[in-house]
Amino acid sequence: MSEPKRILLATSNPHKLEEVGAILVPLGFQVLGLADLGMNIPEPVEDAETFSGNAQIKAVEYARAAGERCLADDSGLVVDALDGAPGVHSARYAGSGADRAGRDQANNAKLLQEIASVPPEQRTARFVCAMCLADPDGTVVAETEGAFEGVITTRPAGSNGFGYDPLLYLPEDGCTSAQLPPEAKNARSHRGAATRAMAARLAEA
């Protein structure tokens, strides 16, 4: 049996590592997170105006700094009634909190406040994930994107997932993204779609 192919996922978020690893590990990849490197790499400035632009910034910078083939994603929530907000600002929509859980709670509260007067039929939204794969020399090898459609509910529900998962209601399932079992979410989510598309590209690369 051949050794797993190493790939660095440019994140310290354990949820992202689990979600991406669930797809890539069975295909023969060893997925490392930033915490596994034992290196203190400065976080790059994500100042692009698109998810794909920010994913490329992260993939290229971390690949060069770590000397590893690197996969990076940028993802967020796009709400039609808010002209696409929070968009690329999803992670810090309500400002920078003390920890991830605190930021998530504050972001969700702000979104519910911003959309409170919007009628149900106009609360359409989707999670978007852009992924970029870069080699250690900074060459961009592949880019993919995935989306996960729903509507914004009126109050959080569910404990699976993270971020805005408790607010994205899936009409066909009668539940939020955070109420889906992890396997079901991976099978349909924006990050799952982008990762599966990337897996096809990795098979060629």
Image: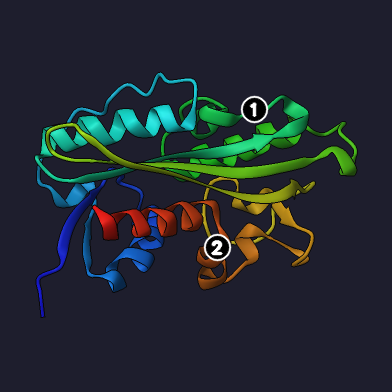
- In the picture shown, does residue 179 fall above or below 145? below
- Look at the numbered disc 2 and give the secondary structure of its residue: loop
Q: Residue 181 carries which label?
A: none
- In the picture shown, does residue 106 fall above or below 126? above
Q: In this view, does 54 lie to the left or right of 166?
A: left
Q: Residue at x 9, y 40 (%)?
A: 67
Residue 94 placement (x, y as % from top left): 57, 27
The residue beneath circle 1 is: 85
Image quadrant assignment for residue 134 = top left
- Look at the numbered disc 1 and give the secondary structure of its residue: loop
Q: Residue furthest bottom?
A: 1
The residue beneath circle 2 is: 160
Front: mark 1 or 2: 1
Q: What residue type is labelled 2?
A: Asn
Residue 132 placement (x, y as % from top left): 34, 40
Q: Which amino acid does label 1 sit on?
A: Ala
Q: In this view, does 89 lie to the left or right of 30?
A: right
Q: Is residue 23 left or right of residue 50?
A: left
